Image (spheres, rainbow, N blue to C red):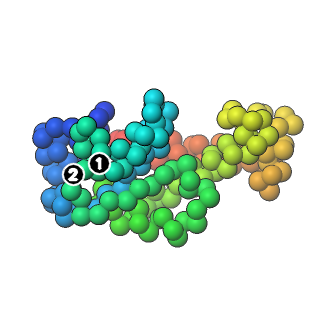
């Protein structure tokens, strides 16, 4: 697998050339997705996300490169969106081709969905994001109940998903 990692997107001609090399075709003939989720914690995060999506930043980074088609995938919204609304579009994009096997994609998607649901319920109960307490803790039992799980089963599933996610990352990054 080939990866192109940058800290500021496609910010110069040599990075753009490397991207075209990885795609195996011109950007104008390729489809891509912008995933702005990681921009939000930075100063002016929502404004930065808008600029990244719209191509209105000082350098085009990614969106302003002239893609055949460009979509947006906001990871924080995934647990509330039916998979048939976004999974097919993700599978169509050229940027994803060769990046993830379908099994790794599903492993990461399922794992992320479980983690987001746990986090959502923790926020409702505790009022903030925090680590899921041990299975015998009252908060852990409340989270499990809200999600329709026995507490020990939820912890076992969480540990299993974390192992699957780690294995997928190891395969992807090897």
Residue at 64% in and 51% down: 114
Quadrant of the rendering where the C terminus is positioned: top left
Q: Which residue was labeled with disc 2? A: 65
Residue 96: x and y in percent read: 34, 57
Residue 172: x and y in percent read: 38, 46
User: Compared with residue 96, is residue 84 higher up or lower down, i.e. above or below?
Assistant: below
User: Compared with residue 39, is residue 144 higher up or lower down, i.e. above or below?
Assistant: below
In the image, taking residue 76 as reference, residue 96 lies left or right, namely left
Residue at 13% in and 39% down: 14
Q: Are marks 1 and 2 in contact (CB under 8 Å)?
A: yes
Q: Is residue 42 visible?
A: yes
Between the C-alphas of marks 1 and 2, the distance is 8 Å
**Disc ID at residue 55:** 1
Residue 167: x and y in percent read: 49, 44
Residue at 43% in and 40% down: 47
In the image, taking residue 21 as reference, residue 92 lies left or right, namely right
Q: Nearer the viewer, residue 124 or 136?
A: 124
């Amino acid at each position: 697998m080939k990866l192109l990692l940058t800290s500021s997107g496609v910010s110069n001609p040599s990075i753009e050339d490397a991207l075209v090399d990885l795609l195996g075709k011109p950007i104008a003939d390729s489809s891509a997705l912008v995933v702005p989720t990681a921009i939000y914690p930075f100063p002016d995060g929502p404004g930065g996300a808008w600029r990244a999506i719209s191509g209105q930043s000082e350098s085009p980074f990614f969106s302003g490169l002239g893609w055949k088609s460009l979509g947006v995938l906001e990871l924080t919204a995934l647990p509330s969106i039916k998979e048939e609304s976004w999974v097919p579009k993700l599978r169509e994009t050229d940027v994803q081709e060769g990046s993830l096997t379908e099994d790794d994609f599903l492993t990461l998607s399922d794992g992320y969905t479980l983690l987001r649901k746990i986090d959502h319920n923790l926020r409702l109960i505790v009022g903030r994001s925090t680590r899921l307490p041990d299975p015998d803790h009252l908060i852990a039992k409340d989270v499990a109940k809200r999600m329709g799980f026995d507490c020990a089963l939820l912890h076992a599933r969480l540990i299993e998903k974390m192992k699957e996610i780690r294995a997928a990352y190891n395969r992807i990054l090897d």
